[in-house]
């Protein structure tokens, strides 16, 4: 079986091609200097004759198209000159007798010979053509048709070493794809019964969940060649190149059958076609049309399986998802606690772990993490352990790694004003007390006023005890109140808020908006869904190009309901903090002194300063 084509062994600047290019440029410069040795000035014919009479010219050469020589432009300064003379009859004009009369030496000059013309025109042209051919050869193909070649990298059946043993935490997706592996290994079992394997398998899920890894594992299990490329590899600025690459890809795949073709980020190529293509969209739609035609043009019994991955399935063209094309969708979702534990076991195979370490406890601390996050967590933990000279990676290093993945790198050296540090301590203490007192909230794990990442000046880390897939109205309201706790604490203790609450307000407003628009949790608007269409797995983005499906009056009511939820939450938070003001003061003082407080110390502070009754005289 043929291996995938290999690229050049050395980059361009380390190869011998640049020497050839440099020599060619030097030849062109030398020819130019021979033909045009120096700068010349132009004299009109009448001016030339006047200078001849004044005897200020010498070394005159009379040619069929120009007269050239030396001209004494000023006393002591001689320059080269030329006079266009094409179409003039020097003999009839009396030029030669004039030169004889004034004692000026002259001679004839001819047009360049055929060899000179070849040197002048053919050599520079040959240098440019040679350089162009070298570039095409290095682009892979040696001809102008290299642009139309597929950019897919092909891995032979023995080159893909990944199997299902390397994939963890997505057991349902693995079980779904074992049928594809079985078909590639023994297709006759299905063909005898008249069954047909799906032509295309679309892997759908959030970023980092292991879609690309899963496709490689399918190829490794089946022991077949694997073509890998991205959706953006098809599209170029030249019209028609993408469609040609699609044709070339499927021709290569049929020659290597049975095999797997994997297209990553399919949404870059397969977005829904618009009614009037303009500019670059026309090229993309031509490429998509060619992909649809090619998927219809081959039969699955040839052993070519098309796999693709995307985290934006709602943007794909419906023609791609119909039966006979990508007719099987495999959801690769975020792993639960069992899946995260299995993923951690895979990524810690080559890591020296402390004997007493419980990976399930670490998995419980990472709800919402995907495979890529967990891989980064293990790597960061190993680096932290090595930095501190540890022999093993323990629980402390893994917990520090979790915080680094979530919040970023600690910035202990950052210099802050005392009043700013006090405000941050009060802000984080407000978050922590509200989270600890309210029902339906996740337990507080750690409070820190050490800056992290790009913008986090402090953080309150909450750890869910279990994986949750639903949220009740009271839970969402409590989450909003926890987010508003920092701003409420600043207002209570310092009489004004700061810009540090920007991210909290953004998250609280988004939760309130979803409660009103998506979940039907507004008594005023009732159980109606006003959700704007947007990315399924990228909830932070919205599709602003979609027209709203409700009136301006309804939009105003939605805004009023969102504000009502936030106002009521803010009032509840202020009352809670007023009753816990002594605990808020004590906790902020301890944060200023220690910078980091664990959950046990938070509970101690709350026990020392119990809740006070709310009276009209309480500020």
Image: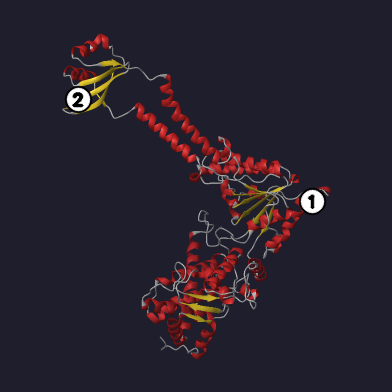
Q: Residue at label 1?
A: 186
Q: In percent of the image, x 25 and y 20: which residue is there?
A: 59
Where disc 2 sits, the SS reads strand
Vertical comparison of 574 with 106: above or below: below
Quarter of the figure that contains the N terminus: top right
Between the C-alphas of marks 1 and 2, the distance is 94 Å
Q: Looking at the image, is mark 1 or mark 2 earlier in the sequence?
A: 2
Residue 491 relative to residue 467: left or right: left
Residue placed under numbered mark 2 in the picture: 72
Visible residue check, residue 521 = no
Of 218 and 291, nearer the camera is 218
Counting from the top left corner in percent of width and height, residue 197 is at 75, 50
Quarter of the rendering occupied by the C terminus: bottom left
Q: Is residue 600 left or right of residue 69?
A: right
Residue 497 image position (x, y, % from top left): 39, 75
**Measuring 46% from the left and 80% from the top, which residue is drawn there?**
429
Answer with the quarter of the image where residue 502 lies. Answer: bottom left
Residue at 64% across, 78% down:
356
Along the line of sight, the residue nearer the viewer: 80 or 449: 80
Task: Report x, y in % for residue 106.
Answer: 26, 16
């Amino acid at each position: 079986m043929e291996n995938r084509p290999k690229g050049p062994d050395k980059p361009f600047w380390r190869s011998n091609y640049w020497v050839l290019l440099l020599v060619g440029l030097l030849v062109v410069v030398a020819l130019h200097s021979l033909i045009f040795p120096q700068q010349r000035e132009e004299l009109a014919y009448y001016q030339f004759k006047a200078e001849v009479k004044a005897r200020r010219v010498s070394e005159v050469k009379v040619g069929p198209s120009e007269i050239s020589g030396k001209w004494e432009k000023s006393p002591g300064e001689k320059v080269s000159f030329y006079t266009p003379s094409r179409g003039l009859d020097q003999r009839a004009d009396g030029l030669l007798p004039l030169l004889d009369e004034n004692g000026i030496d002259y001679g004839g000059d001819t047009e360049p010979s055929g060899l000179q013309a070849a040197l002048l025109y053919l050599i520079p042209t040959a240098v440019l053509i040679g350089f162009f051919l070298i570039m095409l050869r290095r682009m892979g193909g040696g001809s102008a048709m290299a642009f139309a070649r597929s950019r897919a990298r092909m891995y032979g059946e023995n080159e893909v070493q990944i199997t299902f043993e390397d994939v963890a935490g997505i057991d349902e997706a693995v079980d779904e794809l074992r049928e594809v592996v079985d078909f590639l290994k023994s297709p006759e079992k299905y063909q005898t019964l008249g069954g047909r394997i799906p032509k295309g398998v679309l892997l759908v899920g959030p970023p980092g969940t292991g879609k690309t890894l899963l496709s490689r594992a399918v190829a490794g299990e089946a022991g077949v060649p694997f073509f890998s490329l991205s959706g953006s590899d098809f599209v170029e600025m030249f019209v028609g190149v993408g469609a040609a690459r699609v044709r070339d890809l499927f021709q290569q795949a049929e020659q290597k059958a049975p095999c797997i073709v994997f297209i990553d980020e399919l949404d870059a190529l397969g977005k829904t076609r618009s009614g009037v293509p303009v500019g670059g969209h026309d090229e993309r739609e031509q490429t998509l049309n060619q992909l649809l035609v090619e998927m219809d043009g081959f039969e699955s019994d040839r052993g070519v399986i098309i796999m693709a991955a995307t985290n934006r399935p709602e943007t794909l063209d419906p023609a791609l998802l119909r039966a006979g094309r990508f007719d099987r969708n495999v959801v690769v979702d975020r792993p639960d606690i069992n899946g995260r534990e299995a993923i951690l076991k895979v990524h810690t195979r080559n890591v020296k772990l402390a004997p007493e370490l419980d990976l399930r406890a670490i998995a419980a601390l990472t709800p919402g993490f995907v495979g890529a996050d967990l891989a980064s967590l293990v790597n960061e933990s190993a680096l932290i352990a090595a930095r501190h000279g540890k022999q093993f990676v323990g629980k402390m290093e893994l917990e520090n790694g979790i915080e680094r993945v979530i919040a970023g790198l600690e910035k202990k050296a950052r210099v802050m004003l005392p009043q700013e540090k006090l405000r941050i301590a009060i802000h984080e203490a407000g978050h922590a007390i509200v989270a600890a007192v309210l029902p339906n909230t996740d337990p507080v794990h750690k409070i820190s006023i050490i800056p992290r990442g790009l913008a986090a000046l402090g953080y309150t880390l909450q750890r869910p005890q279990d994986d949750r897939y639903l949220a009740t109205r009271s839970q969402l309201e409590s989450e909003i109140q926890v987010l508003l706790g920092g701003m409420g604490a600043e207002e209570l203790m310092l009489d004004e808020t700061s810009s540090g609450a920007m991210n909290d307000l953004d998250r609280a407003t988004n939760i309130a908006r979803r409660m009103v628009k998506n979940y039907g949790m507004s008594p005023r608007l009732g159980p109606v869904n006003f959700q704007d269409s947007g990315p399924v797995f990228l909830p932070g983005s919205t599709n602003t190009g979609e027209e709203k499906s409700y009136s301006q009056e309804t939009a105003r009511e939605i805004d009023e309901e969102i504000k009502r939820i936030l106002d009521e939450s803010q009032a509840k938070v202020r009352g809670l903090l007023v009753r816990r003001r002594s605990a808020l003061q004590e906790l902020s003082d301890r944060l200023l002194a220690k910078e980091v407080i664990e959950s046990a110390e938070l509970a101690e502070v709350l026990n020392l300063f119990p809740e006070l009754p709310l009276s009209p005289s309480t500020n």
